[in-house]
Image (cartoon, rainbow, N blue to C red):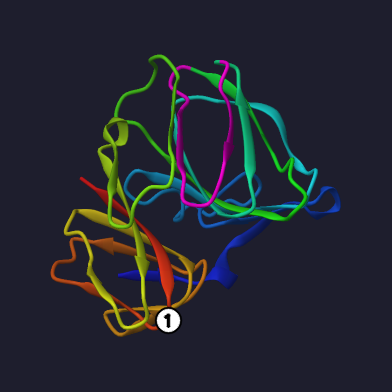
Amino acid sequence: MDVRRADERYRGGDPATGIESWHAFSFGPYYEPDNLRFGAVIACNEERLAPGAGFDEHPHSHTEIVTWVVEGELTHRDSAGHETVVRPGDVQRLSAAGGVRHVERNDGSKPLVFVQMWLAPLEPGGEPAYEIVRGIADSTPYAVPEAAAMLHVRRLAAGERTAVPEAHHVYVHVVRGEVLLDGVLLGPADEARLTGEKGLELEAATEAELLMWEMA
């Protein structure tokens, strides 16, 4: 079990334009050769956008991009013609495949916080695809077969327990609250990278929200 704390993340973005980014993996100018990926996960970015701020149109390819809004509303537009507003509780996935361009903005009046996770697909290329699941229910798994991965969203009351998936790789990201994992206390934006672990449980020390990736 490899635990990494929120304050170990690389700080990026452009605060002068209302963009703050916290990167869990090597990203852009932040390069650490031993922190390029874990399983299929190649990025886990916590993004904070002030009202009116955003990322102008930019390209992606050969990446599965999954977005979880923590607070506020995210406006998404892409070159395949999709335009949506993503809200807390929604799971958005953009399969960049052979190539796609998109815009991400905070067009609302309140600050926006979202977690964006990038996964490496099993095979490169293909046609871009887009999907959004509105208001995903607690403990409902969301499959990303292109990356042989499954996302588990858990919302726990204080004292509630949940089993950790048993898989070759499991990536745990705490969205809010505090949880105990094998005796280790994890708080907001902390993460745990598990390899070959079996029989683990998470217990919520407070009301908490988690994202867990189960990867073959």
Kindly tell me whether residue 36 is visible in this rendering.
Answer: yes
* Mark 1: amino acid: Thr
Q: In the figure, residue 108 lies in which quadrant?
A: top right
Q: Is residue 84 magenta?
A: yes
What's the residue at 52%, 66% (across, down)? 189
Apparent side of residue 33 relative to residue 136 in the rendered image (left or right) = right
What's the residue at 43%, 47% (across, down)? 135
**The residue stretch that appears in magenta:** 81-98
Quarter placement of the C terminus: top left
What percent of the width, then of the height, locates residue 129? 43, 21
Seen from the viewer's position, the closer of residues 153 and 123 is 153
Apparent side of residue 130 relative to residue 161 in the rendered image (left or right) = right
Kindly tell me whether residue 47 is visible in this rendering.
Answer: no
Q: Is residue 101 magenta?
A: no
What's the residue at 14%, 67% (across, down)? 198
Report the residue that reaches farthest toward the left.
199
Image height check: is 67 above or below 159? above
What percent of the width, then of the height, locates residue 125? 39, 17
What percent of the width, then of the height, locates residue 92? 47, 38
Q: In the figure, residue 9 lies in which quadrant?
A: bottom right
What percent of the width, then of the height, locates residue 103? 66, 30
Apparent side of residue 149 relative to residue 102 in the rendered image (left or right) = left
Image height check: is 60 above or below 21? above
Q: In the figure, residue 52 lies in which quadrant?
A: top right
Total number of numbered discs in the rendering: 1
Image height check: is 144 above or below 42? above
User: Residue tagged by mark 1?
Assistant: 206
Seen from the viewer's position, the closer of residues 170 and 108 is 108
What's the residue at 58%, 47% (across, down)? 27
Quarter placement of the N terminus: bottom left
